[in-house]
Every structure is written in C-alpha cells, then in structure tokens.
Amino acid sequence: MIVKVADLSEVVRRARYRENVGPLNDLLRQVPRGTEHRFDEDLDIDAELYRHGPDVYFQGRILGTVHAACGRCLDEFRWSLERPFRFLIVKQAGGMEPEDDTGIDHYAGDEIDLSPLVREQALLALDDTALCSEECKGLCAGCGANLNREECSCRRRPDR
Ligand SMILES: [Zn+2]
Ligand SMILES: [Zn+2]
C-alpha cells in the first residue's frame, strides 16, 4: 500500500487492508531456506498511521496463514502468523544513503510504499523450526518412518 505523506497528520489514521502475498511467495521461492514456507492468503494488516512533522509512524500487526513443513516430521501443516510491528519512517536527507542499522526507515519524495516494510516483517516472523505439534515424534533416524503415524521395528533396539 502506498500512502501520501501529505494525507497524514497527527490525527491517528486506522489502516486496515490486505497485502498481496504474491511477491512474498516469489521471494520465498527464490531464497532457499531450511523449511518450505508459503503464505496461503493475503495478509491482514491492522495498523495505525500518523505523522509528526516529516516523521511518519506506522504501527500495528500482521495476521496471516503460513503453510510450512514440520521441522521434525516434514509433514505440511498450517500455522497462524501474528506479528506486531512498529516503524518510524523519516524523510531521507538530500541524496545521502541512509544508514541501515538504526532501526529507522526512510522515504524520499511525497509518498511511502508500506508494502516492503510489511513483507520484511512477515518474513522475519517465519520460524524455520516450526513444528506441526509440540508433541511431534518426528521421523525415525533408522528407517525414516513417521513416528506420529506408525511404530517401526527399530524401536525395539535395546537402547533404552
Ligand atoms: Zn511434525
Ligand atoms: Zn525405524
């Protein structure tokens, strides 16, 4: 979503909208990760926007559904993502490359594209160690059986 800086004021504006997950899923396909993740539906953004002078505040939360493979048993499952965020976006000083490590974001011109900020937060919320359930028994190291669904003969080994 793109907002015009001039449309914002010190009066808090509620912003509820949906963020298209197409670009996010494209990113996830490009970057190999330990676990497969995919966003099922567009993200729900429930946020507030306001402006203090040239500084823009954008805060709220992201809700979404993520398709992932369990870190233990590799089964696909879905989990609900909820990610609070808070951005301070300041006007970029003439032509200078902004420093990236301050936790402050920058804009140039009179519009701000909020989508990259939301996408970044959604990616940060992904958990490569997510499990289908806390009690997931995983795969047998011996035969690869999914121990949530079956007993395997390796379990009779005298190691317990
Ligand atoms: Zn599992
Ligand atoms: Zn086994």
Image (spheres, rainbow, N blue to C red):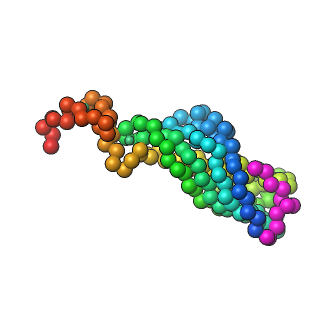
Task: Tell which of 72 and 41 is nearer to you.
Answer: 41
Quarter where residue 153 is shown: top left
- Residue at 42% in and 41% down: 70
Q: Is any atom of residue 82 visible in this view?
A: yes
Q: Is any atom of residue 102 visible in this view?
A: no
- Horizontal relation, residue 37 to residue 142: left or right: right
Q: Is residue 144 magenta?
A: no
Ligand 1 quadrant assignment: top left
- Horizontal relation, residue 142 to residue 86: left or right: left
- The relative height of residue 65 versus residue 15 in the rendered view (above or below) is above
- Which quarter of the image is occupied by the C terminus? top left
Q: How many marks?
A: 0
Q: What is the span of residues highlighted in magenta in the rendered image?
A: 1-11
In this view, the residue farthest toward the top is 143
Residue 121 position in % (x across, y down): 61, 52
Residue 61 position in % (x across, y down): 62, 58
Task: Tell which of 119 and 76 is nearer to you.
Answer: 76
In this view, the residue farthest toward the left is 158
Residue 29 position in % (x across, y down): 58, 33
- Residue at 59% in and 59% down: 84
- Residue at 24% in and 35% down: 151
Quarter where residue 56 is shown: bottom right
- Residue at 15% in and 40% down: 159
- Horizontal relation, residue 56 to residue 73: left or right: right
- The relative height of residue 130 versus residue 55 in the rendered view (above or below) is above
